[in-house]
Image (spheres, rainbow, N blue to C red):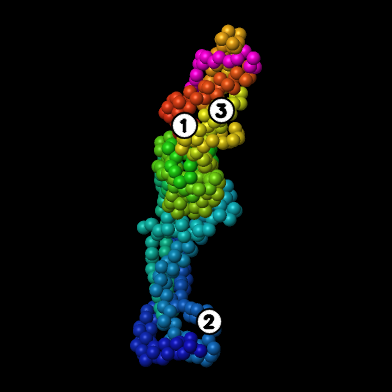
Amino acid sequence: MKKTCFVFLAAMTLVAFQPAILTASAQKTSNKQPTWITKAPTVKNSYVGIASVSKRSLNPDSETAENTQEQIASSIIVSQLFFNDKYKETGRKEAQKKILGLLHLAVDPNSLLADLIVKGTYSESFDDVFIERVLETPMLKLQGEWEDDNEYWCYYTLAEADYKTLMTNLEDSICRQAQTIWELGKSYQQDGLLFNAAKSFSDALNTIHPLIYTQHEIKYDFETVDLFKTIYNSYVHVYDNLKITPSISEIPAVAGEAVPATFSVSVDQNGTPVQKVSVILDYDGLTDGSFVTDEKGNATFSVAKAADEPVQTITFSLDKEGLFDLPSTYAFKQLTASADKFGTADVTVKLFDPTTYIYLNVSPADSATDKAVRDIVAERKDLSIVSEKSKADIIMETAISTKMEQQSVSAEKWSISKYNSALKITVQQVATGKELFEYSIDDFQYLSPASRKQDQVLHASAKEMSRQVTREFADKFRPFSYDKRGIVWSDINGK
């Protein structure tokens, strides 16, 4: 009801000015129609295009009026509200299409355009492309135009000889230009400058657009190929077979700390390093680096702060938005379809405990020696003693030994024997078996009643040597340090 009221009020407003409108209308319709409107002329050796379009659009909202009488009464007046201000542009385009129809352009079934249409990937109006890029030249002559209140008419001609000359020159110019641009793109691709190559292929593809209904053969790689299809294939496959390869598969890290090493990730296409492409890193921690590949196809990165999860992943991918920031073409969707094939690459970040765990072992077992050594190690804040060898980063081995040097030496009432004892403490790295520290007591002289067995002598002499261990081993052991971070990270720094 509101819509009807609006139309009625608009109509009433226009009624007030209707005399002026009718007067202007009468003046226009008094112009005599040209003869070419009623009968299309025949122009020798020329193509003729004549077309007309309506200047007004009734019922623009496609709604049915509630009152049929109101609609009939106001339709003429209301039509003034919806004047088609682009009617001349539309009419001229229609006349040009009439000429295009007379040219009988034959789409080569083996042409690029035919392939795109068959595959359903061409969504543009080739008529418009051909008119804008080929026909709209000074050779296309506007011979006349006429209009009344309702319609606009226009009349074009194109000389056959001019058209043939135009097409010959245009094909030669377009093909030479497009081939030059395409070859430049191929050289970019060989140098790994894929974005530059893609831009060149885009320009070449747009250059050949008005001719893709035909074929143009060239020699390439000792074969005869269609230039237009070759440019198209270079364009849609420019980003094929891209591979991302990190320099390392697993990074050891400490939660909340930086990893003191720089790594790289390379991008290549069939073995050729890809330059100036942005690599995107997805990681819960913090990373740093130069994420654009250099001339060798490498981008560097480092872990500035590791996350807290025991096992984490850094995922690498290519900057698709950057790669596809190209001029639009009629094959842009086919190009972007390759984005799903770019793939990703992962690097595992595996946390390790920076605490150094040490396992103590006295052989043969001796409680006095074990206590002496254990007490000294326990004072170290940088070492944590573990009871299971499998959990240790380093192992401290204490070996004691004794050997009889002289038997039954008389000493007043008792017979004694003379022994030569030794103690050796070593620290070894579990991962490599490398010896990191050594302390020893050699030629420790010990006298024992001849009646004692050797194992009794061993423990007795070990007890005496443990006193010396307590006195001097702490000072010898104090300079020893084991940087578990450095030891673990030295492996990755060496890669």
Residue 444 versus residue 267 in the image, above or below: above
Residue 427 placed where, x, y %?
Answer: 51, 26
Q: Between disc 1 and disc 2, whose residue precedes?
A: 2
Q: Tell me, yes or no, if residue 441 can be seen here.
A: yes
Residue tagged 2: 63
Q: Between disc 1 and disc 3, whose residue precedes?
A: 3
Residue 303 placed where, x, y %?
Answer: 45, 42
Kind of element beneath mark 1:
loop
Q: Main secondary structure of the magenta part?
A: strand
Q: CA distance from mark 2 to mark 3?
A: 106 Å
Residue type at mark 1: give it: Tyr
Kind of element beneath mark 3:
helix
Q: How many neighbours does mark 2 have within 10 angstroms: few (below 14), some (14-19), or many (20 or more)?
A: few
Toward the viewer: 165 or 170? Answer: 170
Q: CA distance from mark 1 to mark 3?
A: 26 Å
Q: Residue at x 38, y 65 (%)?
A: 143
Q: Quadrant of residue 311?
A: top right
Q: Tell me, yes or no, if residue 74 can be seen here.
A: no
Q: Is residue 477 magenta?
A: no
Residue tagged 1: 482
CB contact under 8 Å: marks 1 and 3 = no
Residue 470 placed where, x, y %?
Answer: 48, 27
Q: Quadrant of residue 457?
A: top right
Part of the protein shown in magenta: 438-453
Which mark is in front, 1 or 3?
3
Q: CA distance from mark 1 to mark 2?
A: 86 Å
Residue tagged 3: 368
Residue type at mark 3: give it: Ala
Toward the viewer: 28 or 267? Answer: 267
